[in-house]
Structure formats: structure tokens, C-alpha cells
Image: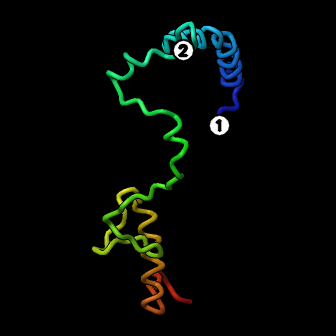
Amino acid sequence: MAKSLRSKWKRKMRAEKRKKNAPKELARLKQALSLDKKGEVIMTEVQEIATVVPADKIKKQPNVEGKMDMDIKCNKKTMMNENGQYPAWMNQRQAKKLKGKRVGKKGGQGKKKKGIAW
């Protein structure tokens, strides 16, 4: 999609608008940070809102990859939890497809097709 002349024109004009507004946006960002003459942010106002941690402490900490503690255990092959339920994000078509694979292996022959056998 998005190959029509109208969408191409709109993309082009949005890009030009970004170029035009970039200096204003940068100035507004610097003003929002309220830089002093020294080039430092006023920390007294920031400390009232949030806890300020020096950059040295953050850099010294080892990179710890955060693993989520999941209470629900899911079988990776069948995608079912211990209660036999599929995840909430899975749609019915995907669940039916996985069920077909699972039941087909158990039954051996699987479901017989309706219709006339010649």
C-alpha cells in the first residue's frame, strides 16, 4: 500500500516540514532543559520531581539482561499452558491449526473427509 501519488506527495511534504522545523525544535528542547551559562541543567528543580543518579554509578553497573518472571508456563511446541489454554494473543485460526497438528499425530489417520469416495 501507500504507493499512490497522493501518499508520495504527503510523505515528501512531511519530510520537508521536518527539515524546516528541526532548528526550532532543537531550540525549544534546549530551552526546556533550561541550560545555565555553564551548560549544566539546574538540578534543584529536577531533584524535586525525580531522583538524580550520577552517570558514573550507572556506567559502573554491569549490564544485566532483565528476564521477565512469568508465572504462566507455556509449552513451546503446543503453545498451551498447563490448563490446556492457548495464549490470549493467539487468534482462533492459529489455535485451530495447532490443534490439527496435535490431534493428527495422536489419532494416526486423523479426521475422515466428507464426500464421495471414488
* Residue located farthest toward the left when viewing the structure as drawn: 83
Mark 1 lies on residue: 1
For image coordinates 53% across by 16% down, the residue present is 40
Mark 2 lies on residue: 29
Residue 57 spot, x, y in % from top left: 49, 40
**Quarter of the figure with the N terminus:** top right
State whether residue 2 is above or below residue 16. below
Residue nearest the observer in this picture, 81 or 114: 81
Residue nearest the observer in this picture, 107 or 71: 71
Give amino acid for label 2: Leu
Determine whether the residue tagged by mark 1 lies in a helix, strand or loop.
loop
Query: Where, by quadrant of the figure, is residue 83 drawn?
Result: bottom left
| Label placed on residue 117 | none
The residue mark sitting in front, 1 or 2, is: 2
How is the model colour-coded?
A: rainbow
Give amino acid for label 1: Met
